Image: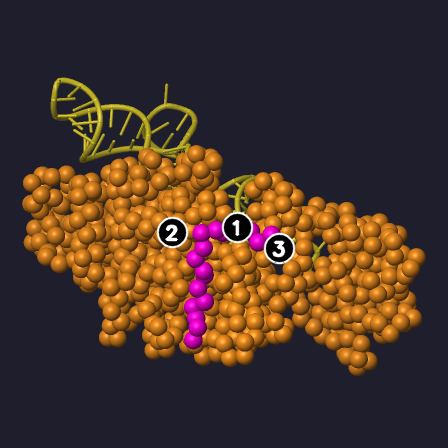
Chain colours: A orange, B yellow
RNA sequence: GCCGAUGUGGCGGAAUUGGCAGACGCGCACGACUCAAAAUCGUGUUCCUUCGAGGAGUGUGGGUUCGACUCCCACCAUCGGCACCA
């Protein structure tokens, strides 16, 4: 009987499902292990071979830890709100919920056919009202704590479609669908005050076992910078504005100020003579998209307002300009310009012929701005000081005079939380006719998304929910006051910001999850997913987690203790897999032709988990070949256990077996599956060379293979004569003393070059080793008639003889 | 431009408290089995010098060291992130 993957895989998938083999029982007598995948968006095109890479890695860990006696939580679910379903609904008039259900069913079938050991009783779905009830509940708590607020924010408004578009739906200033023009239009939006957590999100990164690159990305994204805010008065008025600067020490070199075009003061201070020019400039800026303002704006633009600001340190009047190189959303939206020591200000000053006054010695300001350190000049009480001291001194001075203070600024912005969409969690807010606003009472949650057979744009920029009169209009039963529901919905990030909590207690009707269970299972021990979520998803989830920690819902400061980013699987032509490139590999085809086990094995063997490697059909064949080879070693043609495997205390394989157990155990622990597999191959190669494979070793091998390729693992375990699943069998152990040999091979080098190798007893001393080496014939040839300058001996390893 | 990562055979990749470079797999070559082929099993496979025996070699150039894929400096290339953040 040859290895029939279709039969075996079906058989064991049915067995696992029927016996609920992977059900997590909360067995308090065992240590816990929570291993999580980033849950997928169930797209219509189904799984591609990139998905199973991370899922296989977590599945190996889950199965490995079960064998080590851990109580394992390994769940899966669906991040099922999202744009494609909405677009499908707009196009076809069909219900996005049905469409989503169908996609989920397909995804689930595909995932199950790969044999992952999820506890399907914990499956969750962000579009399920019993799930989003709690997403809405969290929003209400955020609102109550002042962390959710409404602000006017520009959005991509497409008048022709009567709808707001996401950034990815806008291409070159035109709508992706239809190619209609898109403009920036301010609209009232819900914001979440993630900036209030900026410092903690930054600091607590240090405690996490995450890749350094991801931590660094988050640090850059938060972008903390220390500096000062300085007050500038507008000459001849009682108005003033604040600027943020990281170089307050260069205050004496400020020769002009710049306000962002959107700055509130612009209209108030512009002089009549400059009014026309300023308005013209503002108009141009408005039509530019964010992209154009940043990407393309190499050439600085701006215009003088006619007003002057008073530099607080020396009372000098300096012109106030507006320019779009100053961003309204960073710092105070205003800067003091020090062209001698800031490259951007330098370029601007050169272009508009503004004065450049050096205040730090060094560099050549004829050429470029000097941003380095040096003694200060032209700076009154700062003269002679270095950068650090000057910053300290000037801040003291500013604080003393009440015209500025030390200040920290962040690049991180508040989280734009509303979407003008139907297919998302409704934001549980009611706007009343008297202008007040309340949350939907918690006992009325979930606030369900109304069913409708007609999803179409409202035309006003509101979501399609605005069309559904009997949903959107409400009357307070007590007072008779009329109100209107919030028509914005939440972004896709919402549901994915806390789903790992719900897996812990997925059917709880009373709360997000039981406190005792949260205490048992948090934090997630290992979290694996793609690096594309390095910043947003992981930052948002950390933010919500910290908030829930603050209000006593969760017991830990951080959600994910260890994070790992798997690499991408590229197409055979080394390009990213995509439909348009025609290089997509569908796992269904591979499962049919080679089997799920082969796919899993191959994806783990391709290279290190974090690397991006091109798909190779030949490599896949090689993985299958290995499983065939294993099968032939264990199983006779009639399906019985091979005679080669028998009870025996033959010692031939002892060392390689113990080595294999050691290496595989350590490699699994560190997610180095490629080298673990290589060691399993080495072991099988050795087995082919010997007459007898002791049954103990054969069973140990099957246990080690099983987490990677569970179907064949179970089948071989059965062939070895076992009735029950291998899932909870104890992980094999190794004996360190079996690894050392009595004789070791020692390398003899002459001048650092390997000349010969000697077999010696493992505890040969330094002196003996040196003597043996010098006595060797080949060594003699090399040292004959030469001067021995030095001999380095590393016992058990090498001898290096340096000659002249 | 800034930040980070990576660079090893024909290919995917092993090897780092500094100590035998190329494990394992793919590909290729040869042999066994076969009427033959496939499959399988076995042997070999970094390059150069046609044996012997050497020599060179981990992106490039330098350095530290008895000894460097591994540590240090400079540079080049590729990938990822950010991008007027004051």
Q: Depth check: A476 or A535 in front?
A: A476
SS for dot 3: loop
Left or right of residue A299, residue A273 in this image: right
SS for dot 1: loop
Q: Which mark is residue A460?
A: 3
The answer to whether dots 3 and 2 both sit on one chain is yes
Q: Residue at x 24, y 64 (%)?
A: A23
Q: Quadrant of residue A79?
A: bottom left
Q: Distance between the residues labelled 2 and 1?
A: 17 Å
Residue annotated with mark 2: A98
Left or right of residue A352, residue B86 in this image: left
| CA neighbours of label 1 inside 10 A, class few (<14), some (14 to 19), many (20+) | many
Q: How far apart are marks 3 and 2 (CA)?
A: 27 Å
**Numbered disc 2: what chain?**
A
**Numbered disc 1: what chain?**
A
Residue annotated with mark 1: A456
Q: Give residue A32's position: percent from left, percent from top.
A: 30, 70
**Numbered disc 3: what chain?**
A
> The N terminus of chain A is located in which quarter?
top left
The answer to whether dots 1 and 3 both sit on one chain is yes
Asked if the residues shown at circle 2 and circle 1 are in contact, with their CB atoms under 8 angstroms apart, the answer is no
Q: Which residue is drawn at 84% across and 49% down?
A: A351
């Amino acid at each position: 009987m040859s290895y029939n993957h279709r039969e075996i895989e079906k058989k064991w998938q049915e067995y696992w499902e029927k016996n609920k083999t992977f059900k997590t029982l909360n067995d308090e007598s065992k240590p816990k292990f929570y291993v999580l995948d980033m849950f997928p968006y169930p797209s219509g095109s189904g799984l591609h071979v990139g998905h199973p890479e991370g899922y296989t890695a977590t599945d190996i860990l889950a199965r490995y830890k079960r064998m080590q006696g851990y109580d394992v939580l390994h769940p899966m679910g669906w991040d099922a709100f999202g744009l494609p379903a909405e677009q499908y609904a707009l196009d076809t008039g069909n219900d996005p919920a049905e469409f989503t259900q169908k996609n989920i069913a397909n995804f689930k079938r595909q995932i199950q056919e790969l044999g992952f050991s999820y506890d399907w009783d914990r499956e969750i779905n962000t579009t399920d009202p019993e799930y989003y009830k709690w997403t809405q509940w969290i929003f209400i708590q955020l609102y109550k704590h002042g962390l959710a607020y409404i602000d006017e924010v520009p959005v991509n408004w497409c008048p022709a479609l009567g709808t707001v578009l996401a950034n990815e739906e806008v291409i070159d200033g035109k709508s992706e669908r239809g190619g209609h023009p898109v403009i920036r239009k301010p609209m009232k939006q819900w914001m979440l005050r993630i900036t209030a957590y900026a410092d903690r999100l930054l600091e607590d990164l240090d405690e996490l076992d995450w890749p350094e690159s991801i931590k660094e990305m988050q640090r850059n994204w938060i972008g903390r910078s220390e500096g000062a805010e300085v007050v500038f008065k507008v000459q001849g008025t009682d108005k003033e504005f604040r600027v943020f600067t990281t170089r307050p020490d260069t205050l004496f070199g400020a020769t002009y100020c710049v306000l962002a075009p959107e700055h509130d003061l612009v209209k108030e201070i512009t002089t009549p003579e400059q009014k026309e020019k300023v308005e013209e400039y503002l108009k141009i800026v408005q039509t530019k998209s964010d992209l154009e303002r940043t990407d393309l704006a190499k050439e600085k633009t701006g215009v003088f307002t006619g007003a002057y600001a008073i530099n607080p340190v020396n009372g000098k009047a300096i012109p106030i300009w507006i320019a779009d190189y100053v961003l309204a959303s960073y710092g105070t939206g205003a800067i003091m310009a020090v062209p001698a020591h800031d490259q951007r200000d330098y370029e601007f000053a050169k272009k508009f012929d503004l004065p450049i006054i050096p205040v730090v010695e060094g560099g050549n300001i004829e050429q470029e701005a000097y941003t380095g350190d040096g003694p200060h000049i032209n700076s009154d009480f700062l003269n002679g000081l270095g950068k650090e001291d000057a910053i300290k001194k000037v801040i003291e001075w500013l604080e003393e005079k009440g015209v500025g203070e030390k200040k920290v600024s962040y690049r991180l912005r508040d989280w734009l939380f509303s979407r003008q969409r139907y297919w998302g969690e409704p934001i549980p807010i009611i706007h009343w006719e008297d202008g007040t606003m309340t949350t939907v009472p918690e006992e009325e949650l979930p606030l369900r998304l109304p069913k409708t057979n007609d999803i179409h744009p409202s035309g006003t920029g509101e979501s399609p929910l605005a069309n559904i009169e009997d949903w959107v209009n409400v009357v307070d039963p007590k007072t008779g006051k009329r109100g209107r529901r919030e028509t914005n919905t939440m972004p896709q990030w919402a549901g994915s910001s806390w789903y790992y909590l719900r897996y812990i207690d997925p059917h709880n009707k009373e709360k997000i999850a039981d406190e005792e269970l949260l205490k048992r299972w948090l934090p997630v021990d290992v979290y694996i997913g793609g690096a594309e979520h390095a910043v947003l998803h992981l930052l948002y989830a950390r933010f919500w987690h910290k908030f829930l920690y603050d209000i006593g819902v969760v017991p830990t400061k951080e959600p994910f203790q260890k994070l790992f980013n798997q690499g991408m699987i590229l197409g055979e032509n080394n390009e990213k897999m995509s439909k348009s490139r025609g290089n997509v590999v569908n796992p269904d085809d591979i499962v049919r032709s080679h089997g799920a086990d082969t796919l899993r094995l191959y994806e783990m063997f391709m290279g290190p988990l974090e690397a991006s490697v091109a798909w190779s059909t030949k490599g896949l064949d090689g993985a299958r070949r290995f499983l065939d080879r294993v099968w032939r070693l264990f199983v006779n043609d009639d399906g019985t256990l091979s005679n080669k495997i028998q009870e025996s205390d033959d010692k031939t394989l002892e060392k390689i077996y113990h080595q294999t157990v050691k290496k595989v155990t350590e490699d699994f622990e560190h997610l180095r599956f490629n080298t673990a597999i290589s060691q399993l191959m080495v072991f099988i190669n050795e087995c082919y060379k010997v007459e007898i494979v002791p049954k103990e070793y054969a069973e140990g091998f099957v246990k080690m293979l099983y987490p990677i390729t569970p179907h064949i693992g179970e089948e071989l375990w059965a062939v070895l004569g076992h009735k029950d699943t291998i899932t909870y069998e104890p992980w094999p152990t190794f004996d360190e003393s079996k690894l050392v040999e009595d004789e070791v091979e020692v390398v003899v080098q002459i001048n650092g070059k390997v000349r010969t190798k000697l077999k010696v007893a493992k505890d040969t001393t330094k002196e003996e080793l040196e003597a043996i080496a010098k006595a060797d014939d080949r060594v003699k040839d090399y040292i004959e008639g030469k001067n021995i300058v030095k001999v380095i001996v590393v016992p058990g390893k090498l001898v290096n003889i340096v000659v002249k």
